[in-house]
Amino acid sequence: MSDLFDQASALEQHTLEVALTHRKPTLKDTGHCHWCDELVQPGAHCCDSDCRDDFDQYRRKTNGGF
Ligand SMILES: [Zn+2]
């Protein structure tokens, strides 16, 4: 029986690791575009898709260091 239990907890551990890997660091809602500092809608991080793409790319390069 312990084999089944070990498999279940290995799967659970793996699921947790995957979830943590894909978790995005939360950004502060500043009301301004994180890329060009334009005013944005409440809850938005970037003013448009260009800024979001540039910002996402920057964040990936900087290892999500926010
Ligand atoms: Zn912007």
Image: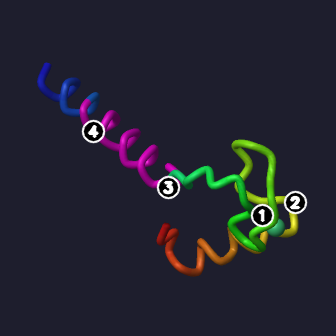
Residue plotted at (74% across, 43% down): 42
Of the residues shown, which amino acid type is indicated by label 3? Answer: Pro
Instruction: Indicate the secondary structure of the residue bearing disc 1.
Output: helix
- Cα–Cα span, label 1 and label 2: 6 Å
Mark 2 vs mark 4: which is more N-terminal? 4
User: Which of pointers 2 and 4 indicates the residue nearer the eye?
Assistant: 2
- Cα–Cα span, label 4 and label 3: 25 Å
What residue does disc 1 label?
Answer: 52
What residue does disc 2 label?
Answer: 48
Instruction: Indicate the secondary structure of the residue bearing disc 4.
Output: helix
Q: Is the shortest distance between ligand 1 and the CB of mark 1 under 8 Å? A: yes
Task: Tell which residue pokes out farthest to the top in this image.
Answer: 1
Q: Which residues are magenta?
A: 9-24
Relative side of 12 to 36, left or right? left
Mark 1 vs mark 3: which is more N-terminal? 3
Mark 4 vs mark 3: which is more N-terminal? 4
Question: In which image quadrant can residue 43 be found?
Answer: top right
User: Which of pointers 3 and 2 indicates the residue nearer the eye?
Assistant: 2
Q: Is the shortest distance between ligand 1 and the CB of mark 2 under 8 Å? A: yes
Q: Is residue 48 magenta?
A: no
Instruction: Indicate the secondary structure of the residue bearing disc 3.
Output: loop
What residue does disc 4 label?
Answer: 10
Of the residues shown, which amino acid type is indicated by label 1? Answer: Arg
In which quadrant of the rendered image does the N terminus lie? top left
